[in-house]
Image (cartoon, helix red, strand yellow):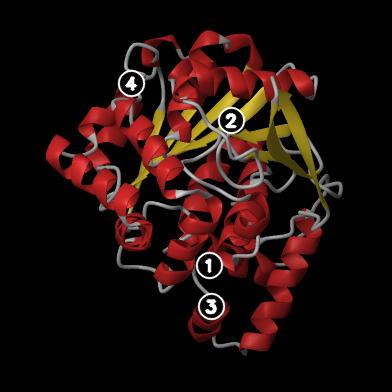
Amino acid sequence: MPEKSEIRFLPLGARRVAYEIRGDGPPLVAPAWWVSHLELDWQSASFRQFWEGIADGYTLIRYDRLGVGMSDRVVHESDLTLDGEVATLRALLDELHLERVSLVGGSCGSCTAIAFAAAFPERVERLVLYGSYSDGAAITAPEVGDSILTAVRTHWGLGSRLLSDIFLGTESVEHERFARLQRDAASAETAAALLGLVYRLDVRAHLPNVRAPALVVHRRNDRAVPFRLGREVAAAIPNATFIPLQGSAHFPWHGDVDSVVRACRAALAPVQPSSKPTDGVLLSGREREILACVARGLSDREIAEQLVLSSHTVHRHVANIRRKLGRTSRSAAVAEAVRLGLL
């Protein structure tokens, strides 16, 4: 995915929502998560790894909701509703003259994606949900949620570190960095107000009305949104596919990023045009052998050990495979190979 991006501003009354456009291809839109910062988020290598893998071959569109990140920092209580979230997403698509898009909804952004897909089925090509839920009140016990909100509102330093522990699980060394990013992205009052919205969102009535092909991905030991809630989402959306993954980190760009990318690309890759023609792709026997190992999630070192090759040789073969398939990442190359029947 090209490094170059454009950050623009969507007028919403007297305020503005910041959004970013990156890459080329069909539109892939990510409804806003809890707090974000378009510029600071992209400075994380793991964040870039995730979105570059997910959005290969697409035009990726992300935005900071009102009150956080690069958007205007004024947020009103009247903004904090499901209808408000859907209206913002709709206004953005209208601004960009996008009639039909694919949506990647993560965490609370999954509620926005579900509600939009149910209300405007003609505008959603496909739906990918990660770490999703349909009833915010089921995320945690009321007294636990109240304690977290109090910590965030009264001591944002401690509250941001508490949320880092919850969101990142045991698989990340970036707890302090993420705690600092949260504080840079939102004030204590705004963060608490938005977290309260997370606990209030309820899209259970919308699930049966989703008509787009839907994929639901959830880590088994997710510490922020329990695994059972993702399973319930998949069970209630007609013909949805559910992919459980190992791990405890709530954010997909922490922990085993590649496994999440591979799972999501299973739904996104079939419609992607390659950046180079793939008709008549010719992989050598050795390249097919290495490609099969890459598809199993093996690193260059592990492939080298298994096939008795040098890591340098494996690295060169993987680069050649990506070039022939017209893809910029290992995960995207595997997805393209599946589409072409090479795996």
* Residue tagged 2: 103
The residue carrying pointer 4 sits among few (fewer than 14), some (14 to 19) or many (20 or more) residues within 10 Å by Cα, namely: some
Q: Position of residue 258 (x, y in %)?
A: 51, 59
Kindly state the secondary structure of the residue where label 1 is placed: helix
Instruction: Please say whether residue 285 is visible from this viewpoint.
Output: yes
How far apart marks 2 and 4 lie (CA) works out to 19 Å
Q: Residue 202 carries which label?
A: 4
Label pair 1/3, CB-CB below 8 angstroms: yes
Q: Quadrant of residue 122?
A: top right
Q: Position of residue 219 (x, y in %)?
A: 33, 49
| Mark 4 vs mark 1: in front | 4
Q: Which tag, 2 or 4, sits closer to the chain's start?
A: 2
The three-letter code of the residue at mark 4 reads Asp
Q: Which tag, 4 or 1, sits closer to the chain's start?
A: 4
In this view of the protein, which residue sits in the foreground, 192 or 301?
A: 192
Left or right: residue 44 compared with residue 218? right
* Residue tagged 3: 303
Q: Position of residue 67 (x, y in %)?
A: 55, 38
Q: Residue 293 carries which label?
A: 1
Q: In which quarter of the image is residue 339?
A: top right
Q: Which residue is drawn at 53% across and 28% down?
A: 127
How far apart marks 1 and 3 lie (CA) works out to 6 Å
The residue carrying pointer 2 sits among few (fewer than 14), some (14 to 19) or many (20 or more) residues within 10 Å by Cα, namely: many
Kindly state the secondary structure of the residue where label 2 is placed: strand
| Mark 3 vs mark 4: in front | 4
Q: Which tag, 1 or 2, sits closer to the chain's start?
A: 2
